[in-house]
Amino acid sequence: MANEEHLAQLKQGVEMWNQWRENNLEVKPDLRAADLSGADLSGANLWMADLWSADLWGADLRGTDLSDTNLWRADLRGANLGDADLSGAYLWRADLRGADLTGVNLMNANLSEADLWGANLESANLSEANLWKADFRGVYLKGTIIDLQTSWEKKWKLVWQILNQGTEGLDLGEADLREANLWKADLSRANLINADLWGADLREVNLTCADLWGVNLSQADLSGANLSEADLWKANLRGADLSQANFSQANLTEANLCATQVLGTNFEEATLTGACIEDWDLNRSTRLQRVNCEYIYLKENKQERCPRDANKTLGVGEFTKLFQPALETVDITFQSGIDWQAFYLAFQTLQVEYGTENLSIFALEMNGEQDLLIRLRTSPFIDKSELEFDAKKYYNKQLDILENQYKKELGDEGKNLEENRNKSKNLLEIIHKLARDSYNKGIMEVKGSH
């Protein structure tokens, strides 16, 4: 156990402690199994101290001199060791999970079998360090210094190479990168065929045009990553976080997207034929415009094919209409009646301008005997006020054209004009045509009497 006198001296504060150390250079502090959790020891002189099994959980050790210390089995979880000197320290089986080791000097330190899960080693010095069997899952190694004498497993050296030297000349096919921290790495055009990236931290990674055939990305964090034009044929993304990621023009043929988070994800022009989307979590910011998809599976293991008939495929834009969630609506009100032919022609013009996948009729409502409200269903990325303006503009334009035609056909200016404009037969005919082009015929509502 810790020497009570040494422990009492340390608890007087760093300034008093450092003065005591200076006056007692021959003393090797005995702080074994001491409870120093949450302590502020920044800048302390702990050179040669025995901290065997000490509890330093959450301690502030920034700039501390821990060189040649014994930290065997010490608890350093969540500790801040930024710029500390741990050269020559003995950290066998130490618990450093979530610790901040930014810029720390670990030269010639022994971290064999240490648990570094989720620690930050950015710009740390690992020259001549013994890292054998140390757990580097989730550890950020950008800017970390190593040399030929750094001893660690091949897997973690590969992670270091990717972050610090790039992937040029590296064949990452079938590579084991499970739970690696590759945050913001450049993996564009990389060969990752059949690589295992289960649970990897791939936030904001550049994977444009990467070859990801059969890759295992299950449980990986790909939020904000760029995978445009990447080839993910038969990739396993089960349970992955793909929020805000860019999959535009990517090939996701037969990919497993079960239980994925696709909030705000961009799938524009991606290919999803044969993919499985069981329990994927999307929102109205998820972009499914112009997705290429002949059929999709709603359950894992190729169950519940859509469309069910194996001889049928989804038409152009049909995937978007079926799966784009909670789109915005725009209300267009027509007072004192409506010319259905003018509206139909105007609506066709709007669909050409905004895209059929971004615009459909959601509901029709009669307010009183004359006023009619038409609710359009549209993408959240479209300016609603601009759409409303265009809808009225195109309608009025068509109305002017048709009114001139009506006058010529009737031969008597204005005679029976309103009667022709509001015939029930014409209304039902136009509604039927528009329904065929809408997101779902079942959501078309006509409220009130006509």
Image: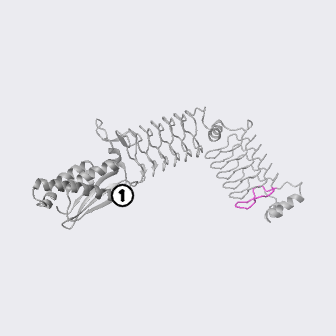
> Magenta region's main secondary structure?
loop
The magenta region covers: 30-45
Q: Is residue 137 above or below residue 367?
A: above
- State the residue lying farthest toward the left: 411
Is 134 left or right of 50, judged from the image as shown? Answer: left
Q: Secondary structure at mark 1?
A: helix
Badge 1 amino acid = Glu
User: How many badges with numbers are in the image?
Assistant: 1
Figure quadrant of the C terminus: bottom left
Q: From the viewer's perspective, is residue 405 above or below residue 185?
A: below
In the image, is residue 12 above or below residue 200? below
Q: Residue at x 51, y 34 (%)?
A: 194
**Of the pair 157 and 416, the residue shown nearer to us:** 416
What crowding class fits label 1: few (fewer than 14 Cα within 10 Å), some (14-19), or many (20 or more)? few
Asked if the magenta segment contains residue 43, the reply would be: yes
- Residue 89, magenta (yes or no): no
Q: Which residue is mark 1?
A: 386
